[in-house]
Image (spheres, coloured by chain):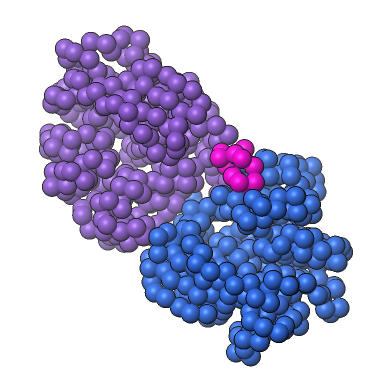
Chain colours: A purple, B blue
């Protein structure tokens, strides 16, 4: 089944302990789509500037991603400059040039209207809510956000949370959103804000899903589920790890077409697998060169890493 | 089969977000023994002062722990004062009163000589090496250490590492020991220092085992294995979590009497389970009141938390 993702398509300039790169392809919607494209059809809604080349678009087209919803505006694409020299787990933002993204008003091509799954990547919650309303008929809605919206625009974010089947955030965001440092208690408070299920991500330490009675529509509240990351001998560029996790996770769910506890858990494993590829090269390079066989091999590795016989 | 553990038997004065306690029973050998006692026979070598009461000893005796190797010296027992108010994952040491522990010279009762498993808890590496030599006939040796010995007494620690089947350390200690911040590379460097296997602990984020060709005596180097922690809605007192992990881990291995990859992995699950009990109350209180049924229930929880069907 098809996923519609709305979010940023951007260029990133990065420095990490492994090196420095200028203007590599990035953006939440880009990483998400590439990761999800291994599992299901993906349609992107976003905006780019005149600097977005055919070669850039080809990266997505090569994976069968539908780019008709990427609007081309006058000006430059969103450009983020960040450093991981101090801490591979936390980006230091050096510059955020929103450019055409500042005036982004998502337009959904009519061909996208039959999408069954909606992913609201990290953008202004007002836009997330707008897209969610335009896509009222979807089977499932998942979404991401960030510290900025939680801290400075909480009142705009809260209505979005009520629309979500699954919210994906990191542990710092969960603390900020709830004022709770204990993960289990923070998760319970997030669920009270509306999402049926919340996935809290711990960077290199994996992620955990917390369910409510509403998670699977059967009134049963299930115990949390945790997934490790794969251990890599070099994390080249952590940018997009979370979006790639989301893409693998949601792509797998869409490929199954239904949300059962087992589908959800398996999807988290695929999320972790896709996150592990994303960080192995700068930008989208490693996702571009991943194969289904690579993914299955790493899924098996992750299972072996964590499962008793 | 029997485990001989050498290490501290102490009193701890603690403050955590959950409250404050004066002089509760603590010490690495104490937490280790209590956790291991659910799986196998445990014999303790340590030293206490005149303030160590019959009631204190009874905590161990009630669990069938052999305390004949706990020497009673003139003076006071080791007393550690620490705070977790700033960070539940990292103790702030307020005072370390070594007292009788300053002159500790481990004496091993002849009745302990047939112990098959040796655990060297965190003490002066010179003493660890001494005990290891006195117990030359054991089947297996595991051990712990801490930043202080790694940083200030590395030359004393290195010969101990060469004696270990399994070294248990936390991620900060692994970084300090190897100068590597990447976990996988740090683990490889630790293995080069001698231990056949290293378990790196990430506090609330679980732990990972890294194997060498020497781990199971068959020349095969196996992939790493990771275990989560159980999520608790209140961590009352993290003191002894690592020692309780070690006790559960090593106790289970001793109970099986042989070291296979599957026994090792299952042992890590039991380690995580025992660590989860340890932190639920101050001092040893929760371990004292744990039952085999509690342990099995939590083992199943941990399996469900991490396993696909």
User: Which residue is depicted at the point 63% across and 56% down?
Assistant: B148
The image position of residue B19, as x and y in percent, is 39, 74
Q: Is residue A68 visible?
A: no
Q: Is residue B179 visible?
A: yes
The image position of residue B263, as x and y in percent, is 68, 58
Residue B72 left/right relative to A168: right
Q: Which residues are magenta?
A: B174-185
Quadrant the N terminus of chain B occupies: bottom right
Say which of B109 and B177 sits in front.
Answer: B177
Looking at the image, is B14 positioned above or below residue A137?
Answer: below
Residue A67 left/right relative to A73: right
* Image quadrant assignment for residue A222: bottom left
User: Which residue is depicted at the point 63% across and 79% down?
Assistant: B77
The image position of residue A215, as x and y in percent, is 29, 53
User: Which residue is depicted at the point 27% across and 51% down?
Assistant: A176
Say which of B43 and A284 sits in front.
Answer: B43
User: Which residue is depicted at the point 22% across and 34% down?
Assistant: A123
Say which of B191 and A54 sits in front.
Answer: B191
> Majority secondary structure of the magenta segment?
helix
Looking at the image, is A1 positioned above or below residue A67?
Answer: below
Residue A10 lies in the magenta-colored region: no
The image position of residue B304, as x and y in percent, is 48, 58
Residue that protrudes farthest toward the bottom in the picture? B54
Looking at the image, is B228 positioned above or below residue A116?
Answer: below
* Image quadrant assignment for residue B192: top right
């Amino acid at each position: 089944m098809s996923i519609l993702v709305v979010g940023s398509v951007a260029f990133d300039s990065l420095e990490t302990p492994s090196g420095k790169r200028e203007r590599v392809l990035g953006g939440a919607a880009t990483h998400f789509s590439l990761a999800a494209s291994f599992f299901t059809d993906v349609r992107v809604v976003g905006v780019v500037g005149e600097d977005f080349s055919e070669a850039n678009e080809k990266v997505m087209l090569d994976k069968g991603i539908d780019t008709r919803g990427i609007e081309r505006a006058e000006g430059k694409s969103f450009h983020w400059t960040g450093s991981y020299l101090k801490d591979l787990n936390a980006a230091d933002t050096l510059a955020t040039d929103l450019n055409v993204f500042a005036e982004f008003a998502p337009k959904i091509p009519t061909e996208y209207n039959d999408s069954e799954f909606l992913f609201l990547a990290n953008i202004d919650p007002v836009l997330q809510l707008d897209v969610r309303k335009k896509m009222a008929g979807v089977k499932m809605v998942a979404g991401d956000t960030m510290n900025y919206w939680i801290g400075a625009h909480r009142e705009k974010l809260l209505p979005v949370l009520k629309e979500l089947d699954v919210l994906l955030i990191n542990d710092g965001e969960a603390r900020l959103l709830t004022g709770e440092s204990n993960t289990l208690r923070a998760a319970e408070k997030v669920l009270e804000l509306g999402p049926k299920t919340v996935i809290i991500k711990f960077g290199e330490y994996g992620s955990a899903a917390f369910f409510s009675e509403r998670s699977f529509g059967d009134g049963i509240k299930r115990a949390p589920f945790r997934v490790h990351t794969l251990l890599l001998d070099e994390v080249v560029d952590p940018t997009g790890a979370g979006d790639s996790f989301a893409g693998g996770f949601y792509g797998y769910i869409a490929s199954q077409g239904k949300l059962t506890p087992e589908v959800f858990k398996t999807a988290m494993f695929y999320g972790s697998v896709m996150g592990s590829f994303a960080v192995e090269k700068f930008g989208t390079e490693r996702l571009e060169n991943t194969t289904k066989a690579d993914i299955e091999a790493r899924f098996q590795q992750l299972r072996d890493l964590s499962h008793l016989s």
